[in-house]
Amino acid sequence: MITPQRYWREIPQRYRLEAGKCRRCGYVAFPPRLICPRCKNREFEMIKLKDEGKIVSYTIIRVPPEQFSDQAPYAIGIIELDNEVKILAQIVDCNFDDIAIGKRAEIELRKIRTEGEEGIICYGYKGVLIEYD
Amino acid sequence: MREVAVVGIGMGKWGELWKKSLRDIFVEAALAAIDDAGVERIDSMYIGSMSSGLFVGQEHIASLLADYLGAVPIPSARVESACASGGLALRQGFIDVASGMNDIVLVGGVEKMTDVGAGEATFALGTAADQEYECYQGVTFPGLYALIAKAHMHQYGTTREQMALVAVKNHRNGSKNSAAQYPFEITVDDVLKSTLVADPLRLLDCSPITDGAAVAILCPVDLARELKKDPVIKIIGSGQATDFIALHSKDDITWLTATAKAAERAYKMAEKKPEDIDFVEVHDCFTIAEICVTEALGFFEKGQGGKAVERGLTSLEGKIPVNTSGGLKSKGHPVGATGVAQAVEVVKQLREEADERQVKKARIGMTQNMGGTGGSALVHIFEKV
Amino acid sequence: MAGIVGYGAYIPRYRIKVEEIAKVWGADAPSYKKGLMLEEKSVPSPDEDTVTIAVEAAKNALQRADIDPGEIGAVYVGSESHPYAVKPSGTIVAEAVGATPDCHCADFEFACKAGTEAMYICYGLVKAGEIKFGLAVGADTSQGAPGDALEYSASAGGAAFILGREKVVAEVEATYSFMSDTPDFWRREYQYYPQHGGRFTGEQAYFKHIQGAARGILEKTKSQPKDFRYVIFHQPNGKFPLNVGKMLGFTREQIEPGLLVPKIGNTYSGSSPLGLTAALDAARPGERIFLVSFGSGAGSDAFIFQVTERINEVRDKAPKTREMIDRKKFYVDYGTYAKFRGKILKA
């Protein structure tokens, strides 16, 4: 369940990976925050996350949440982007055997889910393997 | 700060309690605890419940449950910390007594999970994770713990079989617990053949959906002596801590920082070390969780929790028995009740009322309760005097 | 001089072979393959749609253009499979690339020529000095009815172009549009699949309008077919572009580099635009490119481009189209294809 308002508010993050970088200690907050959890500073500069990184861990969701029922099974993983921020994203366009911890993936915009037949279409970021070997 | 004792416990059978409503389940356990304590009154109450709103459409259960317990107009509070709601209720009650604010305090936890379908239940449980940056992406709770499991296996060589042994051990213990939802044994093979939920976790790696409540009565140690309680069971340490809510925000996704921190604070208050603990009830929402928790509590080196299970160190006869009650896996996991049920088991053990799952010469017991992927944690240490 | 500043392509990784579709409907695969000059088509993953394809193509175009997306003054997405019936695809693309909020935005449709339409409007605005840069995308995840001839070719893909006056890699020398009201292919509201006029879609639709626009632009610019190194026509199958090319006096060698349909099917609004990106990947400075699109209903947009020196600096900054077509692919069976494309009724 997601309302248009909640979806829309996070668009800069969902579409453009906009994050906040602490001006004092360099901590990268994704999504942006008001206060740095590391040094408690309140000043940030807006940055865009790099759209490539490496897979830290992954799993295959076989029993999905209701809104994703037609999509299962799908892979989801934690990807450490090249600026040392980790994100959680599905890993798509591959066989499950192709995925491994340490492999590199790049971020693409994809549909995340739709709110039924009548509701909004929700877009967001997913990972696609760079090499399949 | 006054010394605090646990003088009464109450917990019904856990399972799919179709005939019982949320208020029924709680009140039955509460009355049992009050009778067990032998007290004539209670001064305040704290109830842990993760999501009575999403499960039965009921908020304001502080009032509802005080009402149906016949306890109005005493002060009552519902506390929430996802799956650590029960542990949090215990702590708030502890603080209430220790501070001198109130004398006889009821701490309880309750969850009624079967009045909704599996889909809504999963959604409700999912609210323990980051809605916008975890759930939005399509992850589930088994999925998040599967991410931890895969990383733990990759970093430390923990095996699928070691994780299965956690479930097997907990079922062996739970088969001796008449209150457990699933009081029967299972084998490693059963675990490894059960349906895949989120690789590598299978159905039997996961704690179930359960209805249930657990209640304890706390009071100052002096009052416990007046009530002729023998042995007197003291809460000698209480620790609470938080961590990032999203798994991916942590530096090391295999390390439960909040649990380690909460344990540190509890050990300090109790003036105890891991070696002093005789047995512990931990939050095995998934088999891998138990492995990680035992490391964070300081019982085993980082990364060695899996090997410890394999070597039998956490079995009933082992060096540090873990989850003699059957754990969340076999006993059940009515979310908000778990933290208090852990205390109930500890008290039973210290009173030597644990029947066939009795730990020999149990003097000091510990409970660890956590929410989400470890975003909040509560650790308590109990000693029999 | 106004023209293309950056270009980018996107084609999904999934494919289905003609044989696989033919097997289900009991059709003669070899004769379809020969008749359509088509081996397999691209299939969008369930999490892809015209918007996601448009965004990825646009990002590639931006990489080549090397401009600040804030300077984009217009974003247009042309498609016949916009995800919403009411709510633009263009706004999502504009947000995703960072062109908002000071930007004009609209969605275009005109069967398969919606992409070149977007290009034409962007070019006009740039030429008029109204905007500095414009983003034009042609993308589709078109559907063919189960068992219909179009099911073999209706595929998914998209191409994006940034038009401007600075950093031009291919100057627009001329444009020419030719149209009429010809009901050769249509889809009524609330219908899931399009209808078409069978053989009527040939001579009086495709061939008439492409030839009309082609002859128009050749005459306008006083050019001959031999003046062009690359020639791209709308590609509903592999045969039609070669036939119309022959009718107009072009050679196979001019047409083949931009002929992508045998490997990816008909990407509808992405069809001739993708062909153009493949030509740009291969073109040398000074060479001229001839492009004529076709959209049923019916009409054609013709363009003549001349490639500049700057193409050499820009070509390798994003994946090349033929490389993208040839990268790791996943073949699906008909059942999976039907599930991906939402062709299975659940109730």
Image (tube, helix red, strand yellow):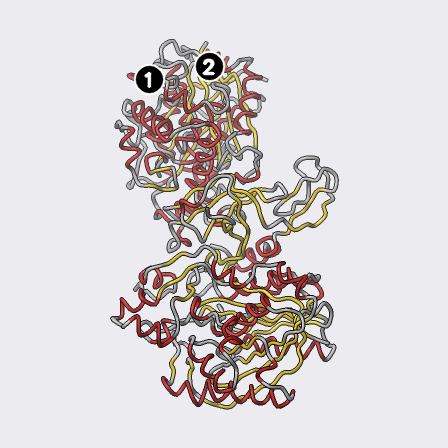
Note whether B39 is above or below B110 in the view shown: above
In percent of width and height, residue B195 lies at: 31, 41
Q: Nearer the viewer, residue C250 or C48?
A: C250
Disc 1 marks a residue whose amino acid type is: Ala
Note whether C213 is above or below B49 in the view shown: below
**Foreground label between 2 and 1:** 2
C-alpha gap between disc 2 and disc 1: 17 Å
Q: Nearer the viewer, residue B247 or C21?
A: C21
Q: Around disc 1, counting alpha carbons within 10 Å, would you say few (fewer than 14), some (14 to 19), or many (20 or more)? A: some
Residue at the (58%, 22%) spot, across then down: B99
Secondary structure beneath dot 2 equals loop
Marks 2 and 1: CB-CB under 8 Å?
no
Secondary structure beneath dot 1 equals loop
In percent of width and height, residue C272 lies at: 52, 74
Chain for disc number 2: B
Chain for disc number 1: B
Disc 2 marks a residue whose amino acid type is: Ile
Q: Around disc 2, counting alpha carbons within 10 Å, would you say few (fewer than 14), some (14 to 19), or many (20 or more)? A: many
User: Which quadrant would the C terminus of chain C be assigned to in this image?
Assistant: bottom left
Q: Which residue is labeled 1 in the image?
A: B354
Q: Which residue is labeled 2 in the image?
A: B277
Residue C149 seen by the camera: yes
